[in-house]
Amino acid sequence: MTRDRARKRAARALRHNVGGSYSAAHWALTDPKQARAADIHRRLANALRAFGWPVETDILPELGEYRCYSGPATLAIETEQQEWHPLSANLILSAHAPLMHEAPDELWAYADADQPIANLVSWANQAIAQGRRQALSATPGNHTECDICGDHYPQTHLLGVSDSAEDQQGGFFSFCPSCMFDTDIGKRWRPEILSHHLDELLYDQFAAPAGWNAIIALFACAAAPDWRRDLQALWHGNGILPLPATHWSTPEQLWLWLPEASTRPAALRHLGCGASLGAVMNAIDQAFPAARQQATHRLNREWAENAQEWDGPPDIDPITFLNHIWPASIAYLISFHTQSQERAEHRSPWHLWHSLELDLGRFDTMGRSDDDLSLEATLRHSIDVLASLLKIDVS
Ligand SMILES: [Zn+2]
């Protein structure tokens, strides 16, 4: 099976270099088996979106595969005959991860695709959930210490920054998602480089810590709406050729891992093993329609108590700013709650509050100038209110 996938990867690379063709599109529309696969592919993508998953699809098949990409996994309707495959007479639905084809498989499962779409959605959810559990338990060696909190992770699950802002040839701090905004990390990271490293990490590592998705959400929400376009130019300026992921411009399309259903807040129990940030936010807003107002009330009270010290009221209405940051607050709460369950041997990830140093000055390069608002206070009050409503321990 592994050798066959290696062959397919090589063929995919060749096809990628050559590009798609009109004949491929024509063939896909006139061959009955291909037409059936295209129909299942379209209906499956729509059903996954209705299930709350972020989904991107390829328009044309590659090597007989009709693919869609949801969060950390690729789902494909396969039409090629495979000698090794017991279902080779039928269409096959396969799931594999990570997204990076060249990386070793951490998830590889398949099922008969000729069955009701609801069954395929259920199968995909179970396959990805089980694959995640196995990948977490099989992750080779938690040998690398986070240089800030001391928890151990696989080295590939941590990010690093130079330990000297001036000397880029110096050593590196390795840090986990909880320590992303620690005072000791300082201003060593640059958003445009960090964003690339985050995309790479999640593209390569199926068992990556859930908390990294919260970091992406905060950056994407704090940045100007057109930041992804600027990011693309910045990446190219630094010799980085891939395109930034779409979550940098549409954070509601970001995948969040959810905790096991048995320990999950009731408002999220209808969702799968993961969901888009938009789906999670809609579910919480519907279950707790007064939550934003409660958080704004707390924020206004803090502003009133500290008005003199903080040199007057903010330029932007706090509810406007809170609405910008609300998706990130939800991503923080849910992602770090999931991480605390997936990595129970670690300290509570909420130790992040002890050394958090957030201010919008750090986001200057991301196109925002309203740096007199308290990002940290907005995040804290929003998470406190949400944690109380959802009964999640953030201590
Ligand atoms: Zn840490």
Image: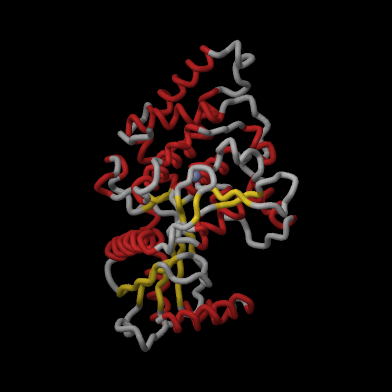
Q: Is residue 71 visible?
A: no
- Left/right placement of residue 80 relative to residue 392 reads right
Q: Is residue 176 visible?
A: yes
Seen in the picture, residue 119 relative to 77 is either above or below; the reply is above
* Residue farthest left in this picture: 262
Where is residue 105 drawn, in percent x and y?
Answer: 44, 71
The image quarter in which residue 197 lies:
bottom right
Number of marks in picture = 0
Colouring rule applied to residues: secondary structure
Where is residue 377 drawn, in percent x and y?
Answer: 51, 26
Residue visible at 72% across and 57% down in the picture: 236
- Point out the image quarter for the C terminus: top left
Closest to the observer: 54 or 114? 54
Residue visible at 50% across and 55% down in the picture: 144
- Point out the image quarter for the N terminus: bottom left
- Left/right placement of residue 249 relative to residue 254 reads right
Residue visible at 60% across and 24% down in the picture: 316
Seen in the picture, residue 12 relative to 243 is either above or below; the reply is below
Seen in the picture, residue 30 relative to 252 is either above or below; the reply is below
* Residue farthest bottom in this picture: 83
- Left/right placement of residue 208 relative to residue 195 reads left
Closest to the observer: 159 or 143? 143
Where is residue 108 drawn, in percent x and y?
Answer: 38, 71
Where is residue 151 drawn, in percent x and y?
Answer: 45, 48
